[in-house]
């Protein structure tokens, strides 16, 4: 199979060396929101007219989406300091790519594109790196088939995904088996091309960036409780998008500043969409000192500045309704729990096992190396707070695990060395530089 772009993630071992102790101080802006960046490229490409994006995340995941749309014939300028300009081709203007689309490490790109491309009448193959090629895809291909799409997986239900042309898609009424914004979004995007009204019911609220952005592009979206629907056959009108800072990237600093005595930071322009703010709610329940300042609305997304000062955290039973609202922040929250007084218990989070890594097991293994008392369970973890020592841990190529262990060093009694960190670039380019300015003593070393 010929792939046009060079592979998105490098194979060399990028190792983080983080010295123990320190405090976080200063005013910072973390990079743009990954989920919103993906969606801005997708909808901007299908819109009529020119879409300008500012604050676009120049990380490998959102760049994978951008390159995919270039390969689908869309003219996209940038990114240049977060600015991107898209000449929209309209709902039916995408062209057959010359080669499979390489989506690197990005689950969002693959699952949303499966839906968006299912009704284009084009033959397209989607491929990813070894981590993405191990993640479950039937969760989107099964309902897409019910809509009449032809989207094939491997026998294991994984990528590559082979999309074949079909004449038409039909609307379905689908109950999501898991709380997943990626499945919801994939079906809504396919629904734009379906005959009739596509309805998706979610078991619990999940991030609603797709719905908000569709409305921003002038496409009607109905919501009644947990049931969301779109009617096919409409059009998108180009608009300007200001991408807020990613709360999932801010989370490392929220945790770092909370656990490191003497810390005092201000994180500017952070997206605080209520379907993403679980990390703030959970940390506050643990006793964190987080002030939400200057709340405002930016292009349909709530944004604020977050002021964080260190505090003595205590363990809690994490309320299950917070789980989908903080799903990507648990690696960082586990570090907070390991530094808290008493026990923290997480349940209802089995989805963590099918992310870029098995985030329950990989975090449990790393925290145990650092001397924490952790017990992984099928759907969560139990963490007894205490003292952390230094040690060498492996992120298993998972960006969020790597950055979480970097913050753990703030409370460790020896240096923390983290293997396999190059995928930090998928969501947080410039992490080591920003973390160093904030007060972490961190070095990234290539070890071939
Ligand atoms: O894109 P990818 O690789 O799936 O990224 C992750 C992450 O940690 O960055 C998950 F591993 O975020 C997902 C998130 O977990 C991004 C996302 C979205 O933009 O719609 C939704 C969530 O996934 P899901 O499976 O719960 O819908």
Image (cartoon, grey):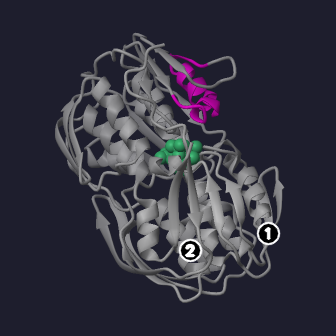
User: Is residue 202 depicted above or below 257 in this figure?
Assistant: above
Q: Quadrant of residue 28 in the image?
A: bottom left
- Ligand 1 near label 2 (Cβ, under 8 Å)? no
What residue appears at the point 43 percent right and 11 percent down from the top-left corner? Answer: 166
Residue 398 on the magenta span: no
- Front residue (pair 325, 424): 424
User: Is residue 311 depicted above or below 389 in this figure?
Assistant: below
Residue 43 percent across, percent down from the top left = 31, 38
Q: Visible in this render: residue 328?
A: no
Callout 2 crowding tier (Cα within 10 Å): few <14, some 14–19, many ≥20: many
Q: Magenta segment, which residues?
A: 128-153
Q: Quadrant of residue 16 in the image?
A: bottom right
Q: Quadrant of the C terminus?
A: top right
Residue 141 on the magenta span: yes
Residue 117 percent across, percent down from the top left = 40, 24
Please state the total of marks drawn on the protein image.
2
Residue 162 percent across, percent down from the top left = 51, 16
- Front residue (pair 157, 215): 157
Query: Label 2: which residue?
Result: 256
Q: Visible in this render: residue 270?
A: yes
Does dot 2 land on a helix, a strand or a loop?
helix
- Disc 1 and disc 2: Cα gap in Å? 17 Å
Query: Label 1: which residue?
Result: 372
């Amino acid at each position: 199979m010929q792939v046009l772009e060079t592979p998105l993630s490098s194979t060399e071992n990028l190792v983080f060396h983080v010295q123990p102790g320190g405090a976080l101080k200063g005013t910072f802006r973390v990079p743009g929101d990954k989920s919103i960046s993906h969606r801005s490229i997708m909808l901007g490409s299908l819109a009529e007219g020119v879409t300008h994006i500012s604050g676009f995340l120049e990380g490998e995941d959102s760049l994978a989406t951008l390159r995919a749309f270039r390969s689908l014939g869309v003219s996209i300028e940038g990114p240049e300091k977060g600015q991107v300009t898209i000449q929209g081709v309209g709902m039916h203007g995408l062209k057959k790519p010359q080669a499979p689309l390489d989506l690197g490490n990005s689950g969002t790109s693959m699952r949303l594109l499966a839906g968006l491309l299912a009704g284009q009448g084009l033959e397209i193959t989607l491929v990813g790196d070894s981590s993405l090629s191990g993640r479950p895809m039937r969760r989107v291909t099964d309902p897409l088939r019910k809509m009449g799409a032809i989207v094939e997986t491997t026998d294991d239900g994984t990528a590559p995904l082979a999309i074949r042309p079909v004449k038409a898609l039909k609307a379905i009424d689908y109950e999501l088996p898991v709380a997943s914004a990626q499945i919801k979004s994939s079906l809504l995007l396919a629904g734009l091309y379906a005959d009739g009204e596509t309805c998706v019911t979610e078991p619990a609220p999940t991030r609603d960036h797709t719905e908000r952005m569709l409305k921003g592009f002038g496409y009607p979206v109905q919501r009644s409780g947990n049931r969301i629907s779109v009617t096919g056959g409409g059009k998108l009108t180009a608009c300007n998008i200001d991408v807020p800072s990613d709360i999932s990237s801010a989370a490392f600093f929220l945790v770092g500043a909370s656990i490191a005595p003497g810390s005092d930071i201000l994180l500017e322009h952070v997206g605080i969409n209520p379907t993403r703010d679980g990390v703030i709610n959970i940390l506050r329940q643990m006793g964190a000192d987080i002030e939400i300042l200057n709340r405002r609305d930016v292009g349909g997304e709530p944004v604020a500045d977050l002021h964080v000062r260190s505090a003595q955290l205590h363990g809690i039973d994490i309320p299950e309704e917070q789980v989908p609202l903080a799903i990507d922040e648990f690696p960082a929250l586990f570090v907070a729990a390991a530094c808290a007084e008493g026990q923290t218990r997480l349940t209802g989070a089995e989805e963590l096992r099918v992310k870029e890594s098995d985030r329950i097991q990989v975090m449990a293994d790393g925290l145990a190396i650092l001397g924490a008392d952790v017990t992984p369970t099928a759907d969560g973890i139990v963490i007894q707070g205490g003292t952390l020592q230094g040690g060498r841990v492996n992120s298993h190529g998972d960006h969020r695990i790597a950055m979480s262990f970097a913050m753990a060093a703030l409370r460790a009694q020896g240096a923390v060395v983290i293997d396999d960190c190059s995928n930090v670039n998928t969501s947080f380019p410039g992490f080591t530089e920003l973390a160093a300015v904030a007060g972490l003593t961190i070095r990234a070393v290539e070890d071939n």
